[in-house]
Amino acid sequence: MTNYGLKISKQGYDVFDAEPKDLVFSSAYPCLKIIQLGKVSAVSSSEITFDNIVSFPLVILVFLYNSSTSRYEPVEASFDSTKLYLTGGEESGSYYYYFICYA
Amino acid sequence: MPNFGIKIAKRDYNVDSDTEKLIMFSKHPVLKLDKSGSGTASYTAGDGGFTVTIPHNLGYVPICFVYGEYFDVDTEKVIEKYSRWNRWIYQGLQVADLYYYYADNTNLYIKFEAATGITDAFSFNLDYMYHIFYDEDDL
């Protein structure tokens, strides 16, 4: 089979012999892609229904903007095959930013 | 040095837009997947914990993500939802159970440590899922 595709190496590396870690992109390796993202109030609990049919394994990242500290912090959240569950209970003006990703 | 590379903009944006409006920009590496998978780990009462070892043999520490179920001490049941496998469950002021993961140059380790006299008394199964990327975590 012909060897074809798209590779981009990091600066200082030859695309023809760079290891995967030294590539910016390679069509030979799935990259992490965001399938859904959003922002919801963190004052009360929320259930985010996945827009698309998603198959495990997923990567889900959730950050809290805490209005009392004006800082962003990673937070734990739980999910199953259909929804992301956010606990809430934060100060008024606080938000969750969530990123549902797959590779 | 010439300004060159590949940019792909999101719909309705110009490729000269700010980076957050781009789908891809060859100046910024994307995470490239080495392997992913899922499984079930069994804990037997009295064992103290378990370790799931997943080989990657990359020769360096890669970026990994692990998510999984956890055992709820109060209800004495497995919570059938996934969350980051990076959890300290408290019983009062004391840490009861530890869920964590780490990688070295050859393996990803998914660890569970049960609190003696509490969770340690139960047997259960925990589903987990993981991603290992080619990109280095230990730069």
Image (tube, coloured by chain):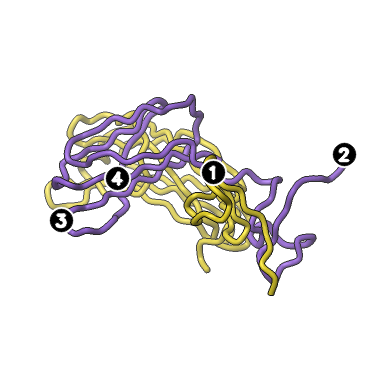
Chain colours: A purple, B yellow
Mark 1 and 4 residues: CB-CB less than 8 Å, in contact?
Answer: no
Q: Chain of mark 4?
A: B
Q: Is the residue under label 2 in contact with that under label 3 (CB below 8 Å)?
A: no
Residue pointed to by mark 3: A68
Amino acid bearing label 1: Lys
- Under mark 2, the amino acid is Met
Query: Callout 2: residue from which chain?
Result: A
Label 1 resides on the chain identified as B
Q: CA distance from mark 4 to mark 3?
A: 35 Å
Circles 4 and 3: CB atoms closer than 8 Å: no
> Residue A42 appears at what percent x and percent y?
22, 42
Residue B26 screen position, x and y as percent: 63, 57
Mark pair 3, 1: CA separation:
33 Å
- Tell me the residue that label 2 is attached to: A1
Q: Are marks 4 and 2 on the same chain?
A: no
In the image, is B108 to the left or to the right of B70? right
Q: Is residue A19 visible?
A: yes
Neighbour tally class for label 1: few under 14, some 14-19, many 20 plus, Cα within 10 Å:
some
Label 4 vs label 2, nearer the camera: 2
Q: Amino acid at mark 4?
A: Ala
Q: Give the amino acid at mark 3.
A: Ser
Q: Which residue is mark 4?
A: B114
Marking on residue B10: 1
**In the image: residue B104, left or right of residue B4:** left
